Image (cartoon, helix red, strand yellow):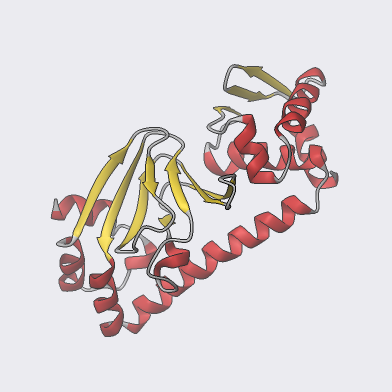
Amino acid sequence: MLETCRSCVFNSVLFEGLSDEELNYLAGYASFEPFRKSDTVISQGDEVNFISFLKQGLLKVFRKNDDGKEQIISIAKPNDCVGLLTVFSDKHYQYSIAALEDSIIYYVELSRVKYILLQNGAFGMRLLGRVSLAADAIINNAYNIAKKNLRGRIAFILLEFADEIYRNDQFDLPLSRKEIGELIGMTTENVIRIFSEFRHDGILSISGKTITILNKQMLHSIEKFG
């Protein structure tokens, strides 16, 4: 377990500069867990006890309002630290996390990480940097989406999946049309309508959940000017 955790979790820029003794200390309090698609990884209100790393798969981070309606905040990709926004600000998670695909998550006990932070200021600065990057990404994505029209929002999210997540112009869309609407602030009906328009215009091919981008130049143009 220790060597597995060291090779998988600690092979990250975040842990560069830690001594073998520090790495062994953290790895001794690390574990991993597989999740199936749709499994709940973290529930809103759960106590924060770990720093978590997504090794494989895809996760959605979301909140539920008082009416039970979900608002997707972000999508977590492999090698992302999961739940960092709450680690040092609250004792309980302010959001939920669920698996969009079969996923593997590694955990390191938060109390042990805090112990290393007290001993190693450089490690603390790197961890704060990761927290800042996570917050900046959420803010920038929300801003970029909000300023676009409906077609531009759909183009934005499709290019995000193609270029940043799957690195392929053909992929199985892990979100339902309803979830896409939650992520980019659109109704389900508008999401369905624009997907149909993109298919009619020859921008996309859609077969079930499989999306194939046929005219990426046009999709980029819609994303940029939409």
Question: Relative to 115, does residue 107 appear above or below in the rendering?
Answer: above
Residue 56 locus on image (x, y percent) = 37, 41
**Which quadrant of the figure contains the C terminus?**
top right
Rendered residue at 56%/51% (across/down): 74
Rendered residue at 32%/67% (across/down): 15
Q: Nearer the viewer, residue 81 or 110?
A: 110
Task: Judge from the rendering whether residue 149 lies leftward or rightward of residue 164; answer left or right.
Answer: right
Could you say which quadrant of the image residue 217 lies in?
top right
Residue 222 locus on image (x, y percent) = 81, 39
* Residue projecting furthest to the top: 207
Could you say which quadrant of the image residue 183 lies in?
top right
Q: Nearer the viewer, residue 70 or 127?
A: 70
Residue 117 locus on image (x, y percent) = 31, 79
Q: Nearer the viewer, residue 78 or 60?
A: 60
Question: Relative to 185, does residue 53 appear above or below in the rendering?
Answer: below
Task: Judge from the rendering whether residue 42 lies leftward or rightward of residue 136; answer left or right.
Answer: left
* Residue projecting furthest to the right: 225
* Residue projecting furthest to the front: 67
Q: How many marks?
A: 0
Could you say which quadrant of the image residue 194 lies in?
top right
Residue 188 locus on image (x, y percent) = 70, 32
Q: Nearer the viewer, residue 193 or 57?
A: 193
Task: Judge from the rendering whether residue 34 lies leftward or rightward of residue 185; answer left or right.
Answer: left
Rendered residue at 80%/40% (across/down): 150
